[in-house]
DNA sequence: GTGCACCGGTGATGGTGATCACAAGCAATT
DNA sequence: AATTGCTTGTGATCACCATCACCGGTGCAC
């Protein structure tokens, strides 16, 4: 099956490659069937907004393919990116459960696909399947945990260089190869990196220059290589 | 029944004054009874630590009386207070559900009492009572929401004066009287306020001076009065 | 009482990062 | 090739706030 934006639609959750990972998979047969009935799937282009901060929650989105960024903005236009989501992530869960407006906006960073589960259907489903409710609670507590990571980064790591080093290390540990190297494909603009660590585009640009000059890292095209991990770890400290 | 620290022990959840408020009350008869069996109660002096950041979760604490502050620290000793808890609040829930270390430390700010529910007992209880698991999920999502408030404050409100104004407004709206005034009893030191808004003691002290001089607020003993709310709201903007 | 620990006010100073400004690089489109 | 739009590099400037320093006040214990 072909779809817009050059994607293959994943129309069967049983053959989905991220099947093992997310909380609405590996359910009992009847629960899985029921969930399959209430979900709908859609394909999104780059830049599409799944939902916007402040909207009343319509439902949750299970990201099947593509990447999305979650962000929150102030009236004056300052924006911070709070999370980068990959396939398998469930977006909007907290808002649906607590019946409060979406606390972030979700924007596709590349073309992708997401399953949508309407609010009311999900809540009824959870009432009928208490065992899934506990898994939802677990997911929420994990979300809470990563939110606290964010709080620590924003509140305790004072200097932009510290936050930048922290971010680089988190990227490289995720991508470490068996030969010890950890090449990272850079897909974000300096502007977006700035929005993650809460600083300005110019500062990020200067940090790249500084770290390159100090041989902490190296750039080959859009691939980033950590050359002096201990130095970065020393900057992070906390 | 008398207890240490001049407190009356609350030994019966059915007559507890915060009974209506917290998630483990108003359960079905058998669930309530079961919970009553697995909880234990204890009284704490000012300064007592209910749990410490990084510890493996032993269980949750239901605060029955007194106030507690939740905080997280960096290795270098910088501390931020992320929440002030009152009677009725459930502490440590996220860590127990996600089986991760406590993400904050909880310290009593005044003498108080808390019920303790051991980790294993609670998890088993939730497995047996799916309907309570959904309420736990709701609580977790509310916690998540307030965590995001914190993220917005730390990440988007740039200047200390903005965060300070925001804090004052949040206090005063909670305490608004029917005559429109909103006296706030100040129980925190400048140091603690600084740890809430992520600045230094000296800056808080200067902010108080500045806001007093500009007639935004007034201090009568330890009681704070907002005298120019619109001015504070203008500072906050976001 | 005296000493001690904590809290609150305020001056001086210096570093740091936001802001503004501009140029150059790169990609896509016509 | 030329235009347009987005991204990146880098210099100059400056306000702001953390830091250090010191002193006075207040309660508390002995």
Image (cartoon, coloured by chain):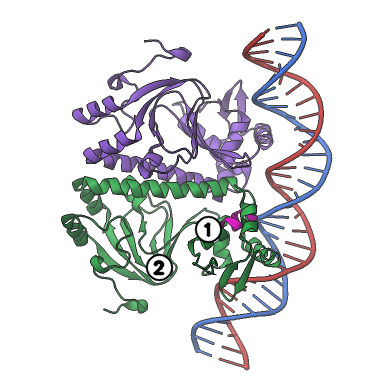
Chain colours: A green, B purple, C blue, D red
Q: Main secondary structure of the magenta part?
A: helix
Q: Which residue corresponds to mark 2?
A: A48
Residue at the far front: name it.
A179
Residue A165 in magenta stretch: yes
User: Crowding near pointer 2: few (<14 within 10 Å), some, many (20+)?
Assistant: some
Q: Nearer the viewer, residue D9 or A149?
A: A149
State the mark number for residue A170. 1
Q: Earlier in the sequence, mark 2 or mark 1?
A: 2
Judge whether D28 appears above or below A120 on screen: above
Element marked by disc 2: loop
Give the extent of the magenta segment.
A161-167
Element marked by disc 1: helix
Q: Is residue A28 left or right of residue C21?
A: left
Residue B120 lies, in percent from the top left, at 32, 36
Which image quarter: residue A76? bottom right
User: Crowding near pointer 1: few (<14 within 10 Å), some, many (20+)?
Assistant: few
Q: Determine if marks 2 and 1 fall on one subunit.
A: yes
Q: Residue at x 63, y 70 (%)?
A: A218
State the mark number for residue B25. none
Residue B55 lies, in percent from the top left, at 47, 37
Residue B15 lies, in percent from the top left, at 30, 19
Figure label count: 2
Q: Residue at x 32, y 61 (%)?
A: A62
């Amino acid at each position: 099956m072909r779809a817009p934006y050059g994607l293959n639609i994943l129309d069967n959750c049983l053959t989905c490659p991220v099947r093992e990972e997310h909380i609405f998979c590996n359910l009992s047969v009847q629960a899985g069937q029921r969930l399959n009935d209430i979900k709908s799937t859609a394909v999104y282009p780059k830049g599409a907004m799944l939902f916007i901060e402040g909207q009343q929650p319509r439902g949750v989105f299970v990201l099947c393919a593509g990447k999305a960024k979650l962000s929150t903005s102030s009236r004056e236009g300052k924006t911070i990116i709070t999370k980068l989501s990959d396939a398998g992530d469930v977006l909007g869960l907290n808002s649906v459960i607590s019946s409060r407006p979406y606390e972030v906006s979700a924007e596709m960073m590349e073309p992708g696909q997401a399953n949508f589960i309407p609010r009311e259907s999900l809540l009824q489903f959870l009432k009928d399947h208490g065992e899934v409710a506990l898994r939802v609670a677990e997911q929420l507590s994990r979300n809470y945990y990563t939110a606290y990571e964010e709080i620590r980064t924003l509140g305790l790591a004072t200097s932009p260089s510290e936050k930048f080093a922290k971010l680089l290390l988190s990227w490289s540990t995720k991508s470490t190869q068996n030969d010890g190297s950890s090449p990272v494909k850079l897909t974000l603009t300096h502007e977006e990196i700035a929005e993650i660590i809460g600083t300005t585009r110019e500062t990020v640009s200067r940090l790249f220059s500084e770290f390159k000059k100090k041989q902490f890292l190296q750039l080959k095209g859009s691939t980033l290589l950590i050359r002096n991990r201990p130095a970065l770890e020393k900057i992070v400290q906390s």
